Image (cartoon, rainbow, N blue to C red):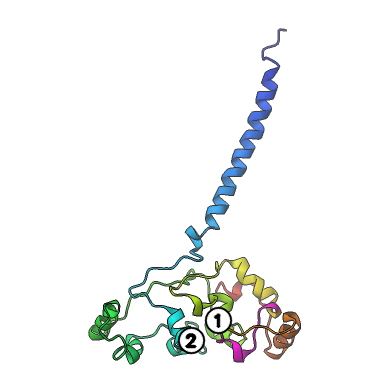
Amino acid sequence: MPQLFHRGANTIARASIYGGLGIIGLFFWVIYAVNDSPYFDFVGVPRPQPVQFSHKHHVQDDGIDCRYCHTTVETQAFAGMPPTHTCMTCHSVLFADSPALAPVRQSYADNTPLAWTRVYDLPDYVYFNHSIHVNKGVACITCHGRVDEMPLMWRQKTLRMNWCLSCHRSPELFVTPREHVFDMTWVRDGDQRDMGARLVKEYDIKRLTDCYTCHR
């Protein structure tokens, strides 16, 4: 029986198979890369706000503590957003006529809250409680980064589940003395694991990795 295909067809067939597998692999790699990029997780991307509020100015320059604005961070699941009258405590006098603060003055006059854009916004199926983490020694910078160095607020961490689990599995690597939870400039002295192991025991921190811990 005469040969139907030229011998070079074997090479073409192999190239087609390997090339097809390569294209499929490249396709999934592109999906992974895009999904892990700031286009989706917004890490490092300042979010537009009704007022371009600078944490750097208020925290680092003016020395305002996190809890002055986020009043419920130690007692409730939600850290809380400052009502407009908190802003006006200072800005009824300071920069009272600044055009940049016109939305704040209008909000105060109308008794209507400012529509801030959430920088950290977890899905509805994820339960997170600020007060539990704060009282267990999880510092603000662990999740939010050096807020005192951000002229505009952006997301510092991805909030992906594997990132959360890295802390839940090894809390001794992340826990901070409670008195330094709100201190943006505190630096760990010595071996973190030794200090962390002591704090994990002192604060009775559990390695909570069951699904229902966050998905309720």
Residue that carries the numbered disc 2 in the rendered image: 66
Q: Which residues are magenta?
A: 173-183
Label 2 to label 1: alpha-carbon separation: 9 Å
Are there few (<14), some (14-19), or many (20+) residues within 10 Å of tag 1?
Answer: many
In front: 144, or 11? Answer: 144
Camera sees residue 209: no
Can residue 96 be found in the magenta stretch?
no
Query: Which percent across, then down, holds residue 150?
Result: 47, 75
Are there few (<14), some (14-19), or many (20+) residues within 10 Å of tag 2?
Answer: some
Query: Which percent across, then down, holds residue 32?
Result: 57, 53
For residue 169, above or below residue 199: above
> Do the CB atoms of the residues marked 2 and 1 lie less than 8 Å apart?
yes
Tell me which corner region of the image, top left, top right, bottom left or bottom right, holds residue 100: bottom left
Residue that carries the numbered disc 1 in the rendered image: 140
Q: Is residue 58 left or right of residue 198?
A: left
Tell me which corner region of the image, top left, top right, bottom left or bottom right, holds residue 178: bottom right
In front: 130, or 176? Answer: 176
| Main secondary structure type of the part rendered in magenta | loop
Tell me which corner region of the image, top left, top right, bottom left or bottom right, holds residue 184: bottom right
